[in-house]
Image (tube, helix red, strand yellow):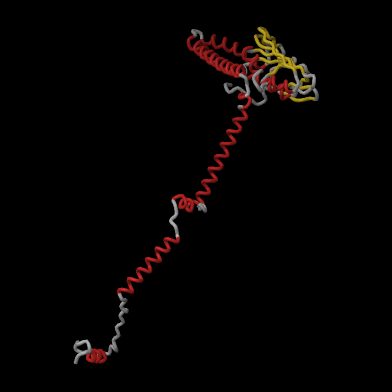
């Protein structure tokens, strides 16, 4: 028996065999065939949609893509911490540069001759320290080469005692130096201004200082007392007269540097005069005071 398409008909026998084996009716589902013309049309429709979409959305330029990648910004926690650290470092550097600029403002506005004077003063200080170094080396060589080292040591000890006595104010001293007189008719000069003058003189190499008959030593203090000033408890009044032993070529320029002692006092309407001399006598003495706690480590 054959089907309509001419193939032998075995549909009944296959169905009967499946029912006898207990498999039940077999069912095959196949997808419906799509006609070639319909598939081609669908592909053309999809291509048309894509081309329409591409036509509707223009392609972005490189700059636009870069802007889209940078904005809005996306920060991580680590990046924020690094940014804060960099900000703190930059702020610290700015403060340091500003403070350094403020300290150099006086030198920036100084005249050429003032700058040359400051450089000469620095050169003189360097030379003075070099001479002191050479003197110490010479003393060491004398101690090493002397035939009678004990006698040489005693001689140097006595010389050193005189030098320390000058610094301590227990012996009088004389030598070249300057005399500085401060006239204060307005009563505007205070103790801190005189202290600045003393410190500037010491930095310039002053070896002995006397103010209105009071010897200035390492432990000297100054304090305001009405219209007068106390120096180690002794009241002194204007005019204030400084007698200073040292190298005049170093002492006078140190007082006249831009923004220094003389300019500060003149801003307070005080009159300052500085005179050089080949012989300055510092004869005000101080009693030797034994320290309460400090003892020599050689004992």
At horizontal 31% and vertical 76% (from top left) the residue drawn is 35
At horizontal 60% and vertical 33% (from top left) the residue drawn is 98
Residue 65: percent from left, percent from top = 45, 52
Q: Can you see residue 12?
A: yes
Quadrant into which the N terminus falls: bottom left
Q: In the image shown, does 279 or 108 lie closer to the viewer?
A: 108
Q: Quadrant of residue 269?
A: top right
Residue 96: percent from left, percent from top = 58, 34
Q: In the image shown, does 297 or 172 lie closer to the viewer?
A: 172
At horizontal 35% and vertical 68% (from top left) the residue drawn is 44
Q: Is residue 259 left or right of residue 137?
A: right
| 27 vs 55: above or below | below
Q: Is residue 17 left or right of residue 231?
A: left
Residue 183: percent from left, percent from top = 76, 17
| 88 vs 170: above or below | below
Quadrant into which the C terminus falls: top right
Q: In the image shown, does 42 or 281 lie closer to the viewer?
A: 42
Q: Can you see residue 162?
A: no
Q: How many marks?
A: 0
| 133 vs 85: above or below | above
Q: Quadrant of residue 122?
A: top right
Q: Quadrant of residue 8?
A: bottom left
């Amino acid at each position: 028996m054959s089907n309509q398409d001419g193939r032998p008909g075995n549909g009944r026998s296959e169905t009967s065999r499946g029912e006898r084996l207990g498999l039940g009716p077999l069912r095959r589902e196949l997808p419906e065939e799509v006609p070639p013309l319909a598939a081609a049309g669908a592909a053309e429709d999809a291509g048309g949609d894509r081309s329409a979409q591409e036509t509707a959305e223009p392609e972005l330029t490189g700059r636009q893509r870069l802007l889209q990648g940078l904005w809005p910004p996306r920060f991580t926690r680590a990046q924020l911490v690094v940014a804060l650290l960099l900000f703190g470092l930059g702020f610290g550097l700015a403060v340091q540069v500003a403070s350094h600029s403020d300290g150099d403002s006086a030198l920036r506005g100084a005249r050429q001759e003032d700058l040359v004077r400051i450089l000469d003063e620095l050169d003189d200080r360097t030379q003075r320290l070099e001479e002191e170094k050479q003197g110490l080396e010479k003393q060491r060589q004398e101690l090493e080469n002397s035939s009678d080292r004990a006698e040489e040591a005693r001689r140097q000890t006595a010389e050193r005692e005189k030098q320390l006595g000058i610094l301590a104010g227990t012996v009088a001293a004389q030598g070249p130096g300057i005399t500085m007189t401060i006239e204060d008719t307005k009563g505007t000069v205070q103790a801190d201004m005189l202290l600045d003058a003393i410190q500037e003189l010491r930095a310039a190499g002053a070896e002995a200082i006397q103010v209105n008959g009071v010897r200035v030593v390492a432990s000297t203090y100054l304090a305001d007392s009405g219209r007068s000033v106390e120096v180690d408890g002794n009241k002194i009044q204007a005019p204030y007269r400084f007698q200073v032993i040292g190298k005049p070529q170093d002492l006078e320029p140190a007082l006249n540097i831009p923004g220094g002692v003389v300019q500060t006092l003149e801003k307070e309407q005080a009159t300052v005069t500085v005179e050089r001399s080949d012989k300055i006598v510092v004869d005000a003495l101080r009693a030797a005071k034994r320290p309460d706690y400090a003892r020599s480590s050689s004992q």
